[in-house]
Amino acid sequence: MRRLTPYLLALPSWMWLAIFLVVPLAAMASVSLQTGNVIDGFVMTFSFSNYGDAISAYGTQFARSLLYGGLATAAMLVIGYPVAYWIAFKGGSRKSMYLFLLLLPFFVSFVLRTISWGFLLSDDGILFGTLKGWGLLPPDFHVLATAFAVVAGLTYNWLPFMILPIYVSLERVDPRVVEAAQDLYATRSAAFRKVVLPLSLPGVFAGVLMTFVPATADPINAQVLGGTGNTMIGNIIQTEYLVNNDYPTASALSFTLMAVLLVGIFIYARVLGTENVLEAAAR
Amino acid sequence: MPGPYTPALIRGMTQPRTRRDAFRIAGLSAAGLALAACGVQGQKVAPPKADAVADFWSKQKKNGQVIFANWPEYMPEDKGPLEKFKAETGISYEYKEVINENAEFFGKADPVLRAGQSLGYDIIVMTNGIQLQHMIELGYVVTLDQSKLPNFLANAGEKYKQRSYDPGNVHTIPYTSGVTGIAYNTKYVKDDITSIAALFDPKYKGRVGMMADAQEIANFGMIALGIDPEKSTEADWQKAGAKLKAQREDGIVRKYYDQNYIDAVSKGDIWVTMAWSGDVFQRQLAGEPVKFVVPDEGGTIWTDNLMIPKGAANPVDAMMLMDYLYKPEVAAELDEYIQFVTPVPAVQDLLRKKADSATGEDKQALLDMIDSPLMFPTEADYAKLRTYTPLTTAQEQVFNPIFQSITQA
């Protein structure tokens, strides 16, 4: 009995996974190979060409999503690492308050926050309207409806998910190892490069993982902040499902997106080293 | 494309889930499972037999409550008509502004209705078009009991009793009609816009808004080319698609909008845009610098329709409310607020009487409404207005990609 206990305790989560992950995935795989339409119904025809058709029709949006997701992730890393570093090493007794402030925006819904950016960045809104009024910006200047706005929106929305894991790994760096490096005549930058940075890599790995995947698949930022030619793959899947009721194409696209992301992550994990991955996963 | 901007969604994100919602979500996932297990069953239904309809209605009784799902800004804020209905009939109501787009609404309703479950609404409102056609073809709409529609039969205009998409008012009755035309921001646009060519004018490069909906944008592409959408062919769609594509590639279009175009044009993010008449009037009343015109080349007219979804819990109460909205004084109160085209012609006289006894700004506002060709179109105005392209399911699969490849590039 005692040997079974851990398994029994894990049973609810296995059931959860089975019901809410495995079954829907199987369902989606099945639908992605069917053909038909919403009026006459869909039948299983093992139509693997659904995948080819979907990818050739929406290859551009696929590539664009990966690009935007990648750019946003890079931006988050550049912005987030120093923030995490500062909180971890210079935060002192106020660390928890800074972390709380970081998470504060998350008490407002994701969609609302994005829409608020839409208002803030409006051509003649509080920000640009004022700057244009002072003659600091040309009257035609706009940020909304550009690729920049979409990437910036993605960056803003997932930034905390980049900062938190990096913070956790930096937090665990013993300040004495930095001192030791300096005692051994390492310059400040060498101590950072050779000691702190490698020790924080698992956090970076986790941060990139937690931000790149949702940023790439997100439809909201492109829709609220983007213009023509900024459509991402998430928008396409939404349209195929809700507007065209073309469930097979929507499923095929979702599966392809998942596969692309999984392969990407796998390669990324190999490049960054399995140990780091395991260590990151162990947290 | 379904809009994240929509007020109903915002409310949805900010309000606690009720138990009914939880059941509905559970129902959705159950429906998803059923959908996947063995393919999706075709459900196209034959028109119901007359005695089956009579049988259905003979089993229904008044329950004293009704749940009405509608579009935003489609009911006076004090819910006047609904309050009066409650006072006169003792039927309590729940009014929900949950419908923002036909496609999105159908996309969410389809799995639920397909699984034989109830949407939780007794009345829904949908525009004539592809999705309404699907609702009827799939048997998702309750056949109306014609004997319960005395006000409708007495007071609706002839045009609104004879609609090509629902002959004989078997499934639906109109809620209101409206016109798709052009709106522009008078702070930035000094000329009087009269032609649809303004939407394609390089002068407004990057300041033009077009609609994301495939049918809406297709209509305007065709009207700009002098093609009547109702009689259009595949070759016409291709031509319209090419014109709209060129418009995008020249950088004229800023964005393809859903309901949020009205905010964008009021704020000045866009200067000229495709627009729905009533939205623009409401903003004008709020003092915003926007103006609406039907282009000389023509605009489109559409009708939003009341119907009872299959599985509704209170169909009798629903029919009573639907018919109640056709009392001229109720229709007048409604139309004074929503400012689209009412299906009840008597409203014009009622508003005129009200204007006679009003003074100052109120009087002027009422007089403007009475004279507006967009609230009370004359025969000549109707002649300028086109209707949507009727599409079969097979045609839809050609039509949609042509225009979505433009709006979703």
Image (cartoon, coloured by chain):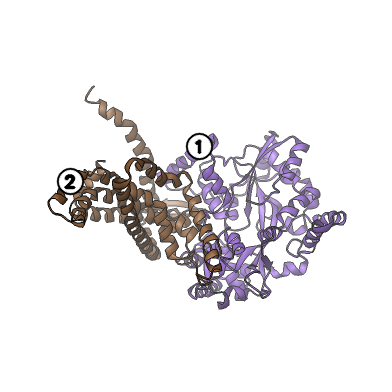
Chain colours: A brown, B purple
Q: Residues within 10 Å of mark 2 (few under 14, many from 20)?
A: few
Residue A248's disc number: none
Residue B22's disc number: 1
Question: In this rendering, is residue B262 above or below A8?
Answer: below
Residue that extends furthest to the bottom in the rendered view of this protein: B202
Judging from the image, what secondary structure is the residue with disc 2 in? Answer: helix
Quadrant that contains the C terminus of chain A: top left
Which residue corresponds to mark 2? A177
List x then y, in percent, for residue B113: 54, 44
Q: Residues within 10 Å of mark 1 (few under 14, many from 20)?
A: few
Q: Please report, as a chain letter, where disc 1 is located.
A: B
Instruction: Give me the residue at 40% from left, 60% from top.
Output: A151
Judging from the image, what secondary structure is the residue with disc 1 in? Answer: helix
* Res B308 → quadrant: top right
Check if mark 2 and mark 1 are on a common chain: no
List x then y, in percent, for residue A282: 24, 41
Closer-to-camera residue (A38/B248): B248
For marks 2 and 1, give the one nearer the viewer.
2
List x then y, in percent, for residue A276: 21, 48
The amino acid beneath tag 1 is: Ala
Instruction: Give me the residue at 67% from left, 59% from top.
Output: B283
Left or right: where A80 falls relative to B10: left
Closer-to-camera residue (A112/B322): A112
Question: In this rendering, is residue B64 above or below B310?
Answer: above
List x then y, in percent, for residue B334: 74, 51
